[in-house]
Amino acid sequence: MAPPAGTAVGAWLTGAANLTDTSGYSPAGTHDGWGVAGLSVPSSSYGFTNDVPAGKTGQALLLSGSAAIAISNSFVSEVAYTNTFDDTVTNITVMFWAKGWPGTWNPFVSKYGENGLGWQLRRNGGSSPCWTVRGMGGVEDMSGSDTMSNDGLWHHYAGTFTFDGTNSTDSLYVDGVLKATQAGILPYAQSGGAYLTIGGRYDPGTSTFGNYFVGEMYGVRIFKVALSEAQINSFLTLPPAQPGFTGPPVLNGFNFVLSWTNGTLLQTTNLPGPWTPTPGTSPYTNDVRTSPRMFYKLSNP
């Protein structure tokens, strides 16, 4: 189940080796990323790698732990500040793939998320993912029940928040599975005084970036709605494998042999059909001495 059209307000690191926002929500160039170390200092301490989550294509962001990615025009003091990630997202979903593990209480993605303002999806003081939402009137640091470690594998994280005017709810998902959820009574507190940051956190008090993440990230997305578990899982589900022959037919004596992966092998004695499934699985053998002339094709499924 795909998210509703027009609800993605930010999308970065979706395959191309750049920091461009590809959501299409804002005019091109409004919310592209840029490398930072300290304050407004371009850094070469990040790069791209072709190591991506299974079933995905392109390249992922590689962070060394000495820089983060700031999203342009997400900080109220910028001349071209746009409130996309503040007033626009009373309800929100933050999701991404990550390989690696932040230091304790350090974020993967943040919009401050400290001192009563903003949010961050991060590691808690132990070894569990944590969805921090400030000002909602509930437990602001909500951790998953499972223990995660730097196991060298890709994992998908998602945090959602919704407020209906009376009550609020936030939820945490890991690898498409709901790990924690809770209720509150208030909307979360906006943090226009901080940059939206990938791989670190901006501190308005010191006007610096820090709490950097060492690892890889892919498919960072923000929605202005709280997605359902099925909608979140639509980003994890692999497309169906396409059928294909594993090579040309082989004539082994009088045996005509076909091998394939995925799909169903169909046969007919006449090209217009009817086509019927062949008996058995790959490899399929037809004895040309006893069988009539046959045509074969693969279907999906």
Image (spheres, rainbow, N blue to C red):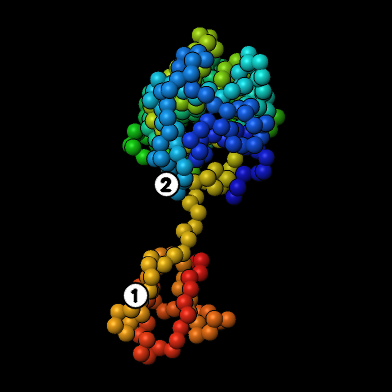
Name the residue at 52% across, 45% down.
235
Marking on residue 260: none
How far apart marks 1 and 2 lie (CA) works out to: 32 Å
Mark positioned earlier in the residue sequence (1 or 2) = 2
**Residue 155 located left or right of residue 112:** left
Q: Which residue is mark 2?
A: 54
Viewer-proximal residue among 59 and 158: 59
Tag 1 secondary structure = strand
Name the residue at 49% across, 22% down.
35
For residue 299, above or below residue 137: below
Q: Is residue 105 visible?
A: no
Three-letter code, disc 1: Val
Viewer-proximal residue among 143 and 253: 253
**Residue 91 located left or right of residue 41:** right
Q: Position of residue 193 (x, y in %)?
A: 60, 15
Residue lying farthest left?
253
Viewer-proximal residue among 6 and 57: 57
Counting labels gives 2
Q: Which residue is mark 1?
A: 250
Q: Position of residue 230 (x, y in %)?
A: 56, 47
